[in-house]
Image (tube, rainbow, N blue to C red):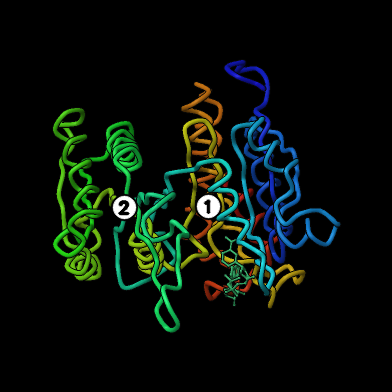
Amino acid sequence: MNGNDVQSNHLVALLPGDGIGPEISRAVRKILSAAHAPVEFDVRLAGMTALESGDDLLPESTLDAIREHGVALKGPCTTPVGEGFRSVNVLIRKSLDLYAAVRPVRSLDGVPTRYEGVDLVVVRENTEGLYSGVENEITDGVVTTLKVATEKACLRIARWAFDFTRRRGRKKVTVFHKANIMKLTDGLFIRCARQVHEEEYPDVEYGELIIDAGCMRLVQDPTRFDVLLMENLYGDVASDLCAGMVGGLGVVPGSNIGEKIAVFEAVHGSAPDIAGQGLANPMALLMSAVMMLHHLGEKRDDPRCDEAADRIKAAYNRAMADGMKTGDLGGDLTTDAFSQAVIDRM
Ligand code: NAI
């Protein structure tokens, strides 16, 4: 590993994935290279591409590479239709204990939506809640799903959210919950958030909203929110809701973060309808790569990563503001033309 050696490049696992994944990965590599981002990619298979090569949907060698490098950039993976296949994303999160799903949501110049000035981050607990996977058929026609909350996981995600808020100079953490109904599970979630706030982060503002009221306030004025902290299901739903406020899944980055490993990913799918046509928008993967560079800059204490991230971010903001857009955003640029427009603005 490259560790703290600021002269060498950071080795990162790249999982291009399926469908448009390879096209947008190529575009992102080109832009990172033009920005002199100090990273090198170790390309690994995942998804249908892995399955078709005779390997598992998520090969153990791919997981090993992510473990070894500590950081990965992931394109979208097609989940095969049919019994017996779990989603690659779920497999990655579970295998590597990536307990924090982090989705920054920010308005972009040149992408008009109903809202302006949105700048929030959804932090979602990624390992338990209703997604524990414990389901039972009690009797014919009666099924249950178990919602799990553990003090350990609730404290750990609360600490992550408060720490992130303080480190990034953000101001406030707001928990969305339903503890008025789910008194034990969501009750534990907010008790842990309160405890972490009071004992460890009293300097960060803290608020709570019952999720239904919280969603109403979000759509009325998302600019009132800063960092949102939620358990798994609420976070899953709310992070897409928030993405919709700034232009959809094509223009938001995503990440799944654990103690030692972080996977940055485009959250949209593999878009089989346009795959191979050079039409895909690489923005979401590019924004995820920028997040990854900031993560590397912070964890490996390497300012070159932050400098490259800032260069790329400024360039894509200028490109978008200049109306340089792919078809999904109402423009007519190809993947390559958009990438070149970003590079031209560095
Ligand atoms: P999708 O996100 O692939 O496509 C929905 C629509 O958005 C399509 O019209 C597509 O062309 C468009 N689109 C998506 N990303 C785009 C981009 N970067 N540029 C331009 N247009 C874009 O969702 P869908 O159709 O539900 O899923 C297709 C496959 O992707 C499925 O196999 C699904 O399991 C998988 N998937 C994978 C995800 C991941 O790996 N993170 C997330 C969501 C779905």
Query: In the image, ligand 1 is in what quadrant?
Result: bottom right
Give the residue drawn at x 70%, y 52%.
Answer: 58
Residue bearing mark 1: 316
Q: Is residue 250 above or below residue 291?
A: below
Q: Given the image, on which type of amino acid does mark 1 rest?
A: Tyr
Around disc 2, counting alpha carbons within 10 Å, would you say few (fewer than 14), some (14 to 19), or many (20 or more)? Answer: many
Task: Say whether disc 2 or disc 1 marks the residue closer to the N-terminus.
Answer: 2
- Left or right of 299 on screen, residue 216: left
Q: Nearer the viewer, mark 2 or mark 1?
A: 2
Residue found at the far bottom of this picture? 141
Is label 1 within 8 A of ligand 1 (CB to nearest ligand atom)?
Answer: no
Residue found at the far front of this picture? 139
Q: SS at mark 2?
A: strand
Give the residue drawn at x 22%, y 47%.
Answer: 188
Q: Position of residue 255 (x, y in %)?
A: 49, 47
Q: Nearer the viewer, residue 273 or 61?
A: 61
Q: SS at mark 1?
A: helix
Q: Is residue 140 above or below residue 52?
A: below
User: Which disc number belongs to residue 159?
Assistant: none
Give the residue drawn at x 35%, y 49%.
Answer: 123
Residue bearing mark 2: 120
Q: Given the image, on which type of amino acid does mark 2 rest?
A: Leu
Asked whether the residues under the numbered discs 2 and 1 touch, taking CB atoms below 8 Å apart as contact, a structural biologist would say: no
- Residue 233, picture quadrant: bottom left
- Where does the N terminus fall, quadrant-wise? top right
Q: Position of residue 230 (x, y in %)?
A: 30, 53
Q: Position of residue 166 (x, y in %)?
A: 27, 33
Q: Nearer the viewer, residue 333 or 220?
A: 220
- Left or right of 233 on screen, residue 190: left
